[in-house]
């Protein structure tokens, strides 16, 4: 029995020493493609924008690696530790393709990275859906508190195929807007938050074929509405060419003034507003035409201060006040 144990032990010992040994070189699998990351800044470059491509790795010291950058067939940068390359992007849908060859200091096979930068542009426009402006007003209507805003993304895509197949990801300051985002959802309509002084909306547009990626952020100002008064002539109608400012002189006969609530979230909800007119801080009956008031001179003369408060009682912040002083 003891002889049998001795023979088994001797056999195992000889087997271990007769196995081929493996060196560290035999175990080293070298630096792999996945060990080197490529970062593009900005992530989605616009046409003619400054772009930087950078290499990073936690598996090898790239500062000691030999790196060559080629744009097409032209070498644009080469040398030890050349981990970044900056350039100006071309025009819309004009790609720049780079071949980056990395030779790690550890030796082994070279790592080759391919990067294509395809500048993409997108326009983002917005409108105040219910922000009121008079008919003559030629400027842009701005949203006020609790107003409705519509934002539209217009991709600048040359390829007809890409242009018909675009997904949109909308974001505000709180993050992604899942319900507003999706295939061909190029617009987003929302009611602004009353406490915000502005609204920041971002959109990322991506074609299904991967040839187009563009992003843009737009900051939309939220303004305070204001009432401006105008004189209404029996012959010429409302004289929009001249606003009434304080210390308006009264004609010999009566005068009708019209209140225009600029930028108030008023369009489509006129019947929700109350109209509180005052003369010298005393309430007067609301006229039949609620934004018009006819004033007559008095024998005593002097000044009359006219106030108007327009308010939507269904909301917290849709309110505007106007004031005018008339020399009677």
Image: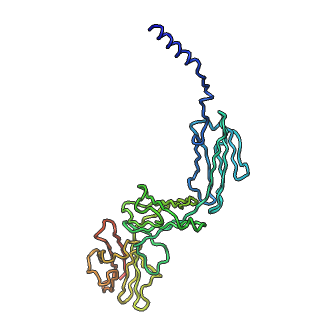
| Residue that lies at the very extreme toward the bottom in this rendered image | 235
> What residue is shown at x 61% (from left), y 37% (from top)?
31
Q: Residue at x 40, y 82 (%)?
A: 249
Q: Which quadrant would residue 107 be assigned to in this image?
A: top right
Please report the residue visible at 49 percent of the width from the left and 10 percent of the height from the top: 6
Image coords of residue 234 (percent x, y): 39, 91
Location of residue 132 with respect to 72 vertically, above or below: below
Side (left or right) of 39 relative to 316: right
Judge by depth and name the residue closer to the eye, 311 or 304: 311
Image quarter hosting the C terminus = bottom left
Q: Nearer the viewer, residue 42 or 275?
A: 42
Residue at the limit of the structure toward the top, as seen here: 2
- Residue that lies at the very extreme toward the right in this rendered image: 74
Residue 91 lies, in percent from the top left, at 64, 62
Classify 239 as above or below 221.
below
Q: Position of residue 194 (x, y in %)?
A: 36, 63
Say which quarter of the image contains residue 128: bottom left
- In the picture, the quarter occupied by the N terminus is top left
Residue 279 placement, left or right of 125 = left
Can residue 64 be spotted in the picture? no
Seen in the picture, residue 217 relative to 55 is either above or below; the reply is below
User: Is residue 28 visible from the viewing direction of this image?
Assistant: yes
Q: Nearer the viewer, residue 145 or 228?
A: 145
Q: Nearer the viewer, residue 25 or 78?
A: 25
State which quadrant residue 244 falls in: bottom left
């Amino acid at each position: 029995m003891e002889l049998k144990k001795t023979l088994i032990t001797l056999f195992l010992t000889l087997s271990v020493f007769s196995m081929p040994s493996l060196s560290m070189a035999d175990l080293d699998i070298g630096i792999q493609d996945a060990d080197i990351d490529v970062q593009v800044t900005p992530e989605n470059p616009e046409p003619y924008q400054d772009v930087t491509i950078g290499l990073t790795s936690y598996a090898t010291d790239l500062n000691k690696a030999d790196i060559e950058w080629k744009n097409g067939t032209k070498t644009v940068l080469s040398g030890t530790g050349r981990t970044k390359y900056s350039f100006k992007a071309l025009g819309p849908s004009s790609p720049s393709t780079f071949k980056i060859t990395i030779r790690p200091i550890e030796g082994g096979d070279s790592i080759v990275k391919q990067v294509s930068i395809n500048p993409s542009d997108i326009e983002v426009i917005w409108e105040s859906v219910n922000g009121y402006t008079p008919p003559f007003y030629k400027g842009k209507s701005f949203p006020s508190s609790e107003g409705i805003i519509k934002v539209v993304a217009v991709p600048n895509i040359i390829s007809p195929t890409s242009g018909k197949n675009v997904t949109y990801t909308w974001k505000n300051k709180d993050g992604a807007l899942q319900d507003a985002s999706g295939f061909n959802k190029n617009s987003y309509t929302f009611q602004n938050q009353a406490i915000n002084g502005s609204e920041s909306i971002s959109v990322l547009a991506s074609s299904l074929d991967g040839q187009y990626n563009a992003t843009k952020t737009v900051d939309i100002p939220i303004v305070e509405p204001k009432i401006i008064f105008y004189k209404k002539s029996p012959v010429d109608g409302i004289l929009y060419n001249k606003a009434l400012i304080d210390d308006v002189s009264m004609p010999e006969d009566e005068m009708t003034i019209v209140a225009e609530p600029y930028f108030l979230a008023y369009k489509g909800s006129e019947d929700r507003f109350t109209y509180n007119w005052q003369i010298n801080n005393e309430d007067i009956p609301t006229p039949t035409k609620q934004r018009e008031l006819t004033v007559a001179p008095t024998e005593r003369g002097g000044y009359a201060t006219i106030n108007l408060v327009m308010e939507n009682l269904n909301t917290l912040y849709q309110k505007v006040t106007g004031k005018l002083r008339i020399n009677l």
